[in-house]
Amino acid sequence: MDMTITEKILAAHARKEKVQPGENVWVDVDVLMTHDVCGPGTIGIFKEQFGKGAKVWDRKKVVIIPDHYIFTSDTHANRNIDILREFVAEQDLPHYYDVGTEDYKGVCHLALAQEGHNRPGEVLFGTDSHTCTSGAFGMFATGIGNTDAAFILGTGKLWVKVPESMRFEFTGEFPSYIMAKDIILQVIGDIGVDGATYRTMEWTGSAIMKFSMEERMTLCNMAIEGGGKNAVIEADDTTFEYVKRRTDRPYTVYHSDPDANYFFKKTYNAADMEPIVAKPHSPDNKALVKDCTDVKIDRSYIGSCTGGKLTDFLAAAKLLNGKKVAVDTFIVPATVEVEKDLQQEKLDGKSLMDIFKNSGCHIGDASCAACLGGPQDTFGRTHGTEVVVSTTNRNFPGRMGSKQSEVYLASPYTVAASALTGHITDPREFFQ
């Protein structure tokens, strides 16, 4: 029986020769990730169900990354971190990246990749809906709730229904002004926020395979915004090179069979793609950037697991270099590693950090920050009726703070171009 990448990975981890969509199987878990928002709840359920003295199934396969509500004096948020620290000490967990220490990393989804926890062919669950980001590495990765995570902590297994797969192929070559964010917004706009519900979004085609790992992560990150169970991109030399720099652990590579069955297939011509925004208040409220140039903005925001990677900041710096922003513009690296890269990576002899500071941008600490609002003193919280153009992944009412604010989702190119003009701007205006 021919199978897709996702089906092959789940079959291998269910210790079966084959599986098919709709089948329920027990799956062995390679990595469980949790953070400061869901970690305490997961820990509480684990202790309630397995006993206060219970030990996790494999201490080396648990990764805990505080990143959401961390730079705050909120006592409830601080207590969440205390619970994580107590559990890590009790269980002697080696993969804990504590805030306020040299071990702190930043946003969990990029940190997982940077710390070598993303490996082709593996199964990774996380208590965060954007865990699907890791599918960029040719693995099965998806978000789960606290109860499922607690069960994994105790057993190392999870009962999983095999998803149907959807195949999105992009042939040819993308124009220089197109980024992965444009592509995922285009597709979500085409299928709707429920179009991939409990299905795999498999990305393929010559244009996709030319993307860097960071751009591939952007594509997979927002699968959940289309309702997807997971996203996946076949591992190739780009994947192998990235993983080799991060870990020497062995892994298995899976490929979709030529005659594998897909629920849905669609092929796009990459050359036809144009810059896209998602208008308030849904990621599928698609529009061409060139049709939204009458929208005045109050803020521009470049950051988050979706838009806070080095590739994203390189793109923004190309447009901001030597210019001044017209509105408050926030630069928030996803991880500490990216923050260091901003200081070391140069463009025209200047570091990216200097380019952003000279253009008048505000620099935030590596974290989730304003992507989900957060406590009142969390950096970057929006207020009032502000209009924001952002590289983040969701634009629901209140997502970035105020329920009265309007958030437009866009690529780093579009956000940077808009920052320079004070209104939503097609980045092609700044391309020679």
Image: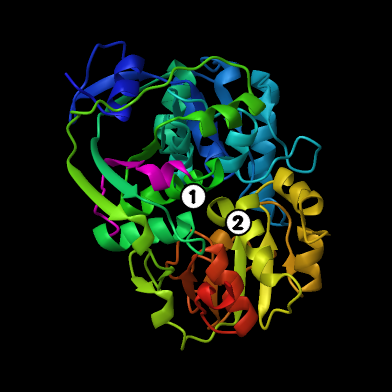
Screen quadrant of the N terminus? top left
- The residue sitting at 41% across, 38% down in the picture is 145
129 or 244: which is nearer to us? 244
x then y, percent, for residue 74: 69, 57
Q: Which residue is mark 2?
A: 312
x then y, percent, for residue 370: 60, 63
146 or 65: which is nearer to us? 65
Residue 224 in magenta stretch? no
Q: Circle 2 sits in a helix, a strand or a loop, which is it?
A: helix
Where, by quadrant of the figure, is residue 88 drawn?
top right
- The residue sitting at 32% across, 57% down in the picture is 187
Where, by quadrant of the figure, is residue 432 drawn?
bottom right
From mark 2 to mark 1, how far is it between C-alphas?
A: 10 Å
Q: Are marks 2 and 1 in contact (CB under 8 Å)?
A: yes
- Kind of residue at disc 2: Asp
Q: Is residue 309 visible?
A: no
Q: Which residues are magenta?
A: 192-210
123 or 343: which is nearer to us? 343
Q: Which residue is mark 1?
A: 218
Mark 2 crowdedness (10 Å alpha carbons): few <14, some 14-19, many ≥20: many
x then y, percent, for residue 202: 32, 40
Q: Is residue 92 left or right of residue 230?
A: right
